[in-house]
Image (cartoon, rainbow, N blue to C red):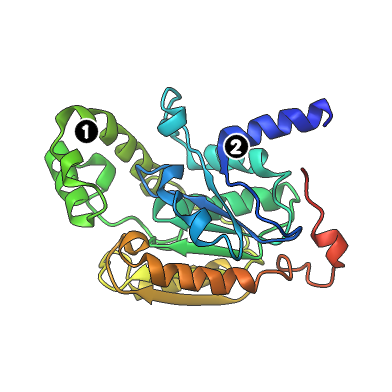
């Protein structure tokens, strides 16, 4: 491995928690972006659950988990550019991106950043539990809520363990991460940019009032390719409460991903399947 490749690998390992690849030279890859306050560990069960169809990797964001000593991101565009630079040599088809809540907004921005760099785009963008980028954030903004109101909202979401919410010391560390991540999504400016030539699959929970059918269908404005919506029983974090059905859907989608990204269907398999070590 030459020095340039070593540097790229070091940068990529900082930004991606890579699962051990399974046999199969051209297995799909799924790159996952966590929700506000979450990290790569939110997808820790997915590599095993999807090992029969894909290699699952998760983005490591600054300010949490292994990168907790680093400053929290404050600009979603700058963050998307950093992620795109880090994964540019990794983005070889067939691959897909999955983002949940704030992670959906970030994943969408990352695809735009990849397009600006001339990188082969994913065969599918899966956006879960988030309004479309052009839609304004509902008021009051979550990132600016008083402490007790923010804690109450997290409790209603249902994904944060009550033991954590009752622990003041842990909350003192956790809440700034939550606020920073919500601010990334809620204060992001929507730049005029062409719709992506990438299929989008929008996912939502039937009981997630802030992200209903109007918000999910609005993602259709951001693609010139295929667009679909799928809803699951549960609320904002159906990713956890309805994991089995979500995995069934992802298996189906990833099995159909072998043709490569939008716009590259006619390329020979030998070209589509070239990947760095």
| Corner quadrant of residue 179 | top left
Q: Seen in the image, is 173 located left or right of residue 163?
A: right
Q: Position of residue 266 (x, y in %)?
A: 84, 72
| Corner quadrant of residue 204 | bottom left
Q: Seen in the image, is 125 located left or right of residue 23?
A: left
Q: Position of residue 5 (x, y in %)?
A: 78, 33
| Corner quadrant of residue 151 | top left
Residue 13 at least partly seen: yes
In the displayed orientation, state which residue is furthest to the front: 23
Residue occupying image coordinates x 61% and y 54%: 111
Density class for disc 2 (Cα within 10 Å; few <14, some 14-19, many ≥20) is some
- Asked whether the residues under the numbered discs 1 and 2 touch, taking CB atoms below 8 Å apart as contact, a structural biologist would say no
Nearer the observer, 76 or 160: 160
| Depicted 117 relative to depicted 263: above or below | above
* Residue topped by disc 1: 171
The quadrant in which the N terminus is found is top right
Q: Identify the mark at residue 263; answer none if there is no mark.
A: none
Residue 224 at least partly seen: no
The quadrant in which the C terminus is found is top right
Nearer the observer, 84 or 77: 84
Density class for disc 1 (Cα within 10 Å; few <14, some 14-19, many ≥20) is some
For marks 1 and 2, the one nearer the N-term is 2
Label 1 and label 2: CA atoms lie apart by: 28 Å
Which secondary structure lies at badge 2?
helix
Residue occupying image coordinates x 26% and y 35%: 175
Which secondary structure lies at badge 1?
helix
* Residue topped by disc 2: 82
Mark closer to the observer (1, 2):
1
């Amino acid at each position: 491995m030459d020095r340039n490749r070593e540097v790229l690998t070091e940068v990529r390992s900082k930004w991606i928690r890579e699962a051990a690849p399974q046999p199969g030279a051209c297995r799909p890859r799924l790159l996952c972006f966590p929700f506000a306050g979450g990290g790569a560990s939110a997808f820790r069960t997915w590599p095993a659950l999807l090992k029969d169809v894909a290699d699952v990797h998760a983005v490591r964001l600054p300010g949490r988990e292994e990168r907790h000593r680093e400053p929290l991101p404050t600009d979603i565009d700058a963050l998307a550019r950093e992620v795109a630079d880090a994964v540019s040599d990794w983005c070889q088809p067939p691959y897909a991106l999955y983002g949940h809540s704030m992670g959906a907004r970030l994943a969408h921005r990352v695809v735009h950043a990849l397009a600006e760099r001339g990188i082969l785009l994913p065969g599918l963008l899966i956006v879960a539990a988030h309004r479309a980028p052009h839609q304004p954030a509902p008021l009051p903004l979550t990132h600016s809520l008083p402490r007790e109101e923010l804690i109450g909202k997290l409790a209603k979401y249902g994904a944060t363990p009550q033991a954590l919410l009752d622990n003041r010391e842990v909350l003192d560390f956790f809440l700034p991460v939550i606020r920073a991540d919500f601010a990334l999504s809620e204060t992001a400016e929507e730049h005029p940019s062409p719709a992506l030539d990438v299929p989008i699959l929008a996912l939502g929970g039937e009981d997630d009032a802030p992200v209903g059918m109007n918000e999910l269908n609005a993602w259709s404005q951001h693609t010139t390719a295929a667009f679909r919506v799928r809803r699951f029983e549960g609320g904002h974090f159906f990713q956890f409460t309805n994991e089995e059905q979500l995995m069934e859907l992802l298996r189906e989608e990833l099995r159909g991903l072998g043709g490569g990204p939008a716009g590259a269907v006619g390329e020979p398999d030998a070209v589509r399947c070239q990947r760095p070590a």
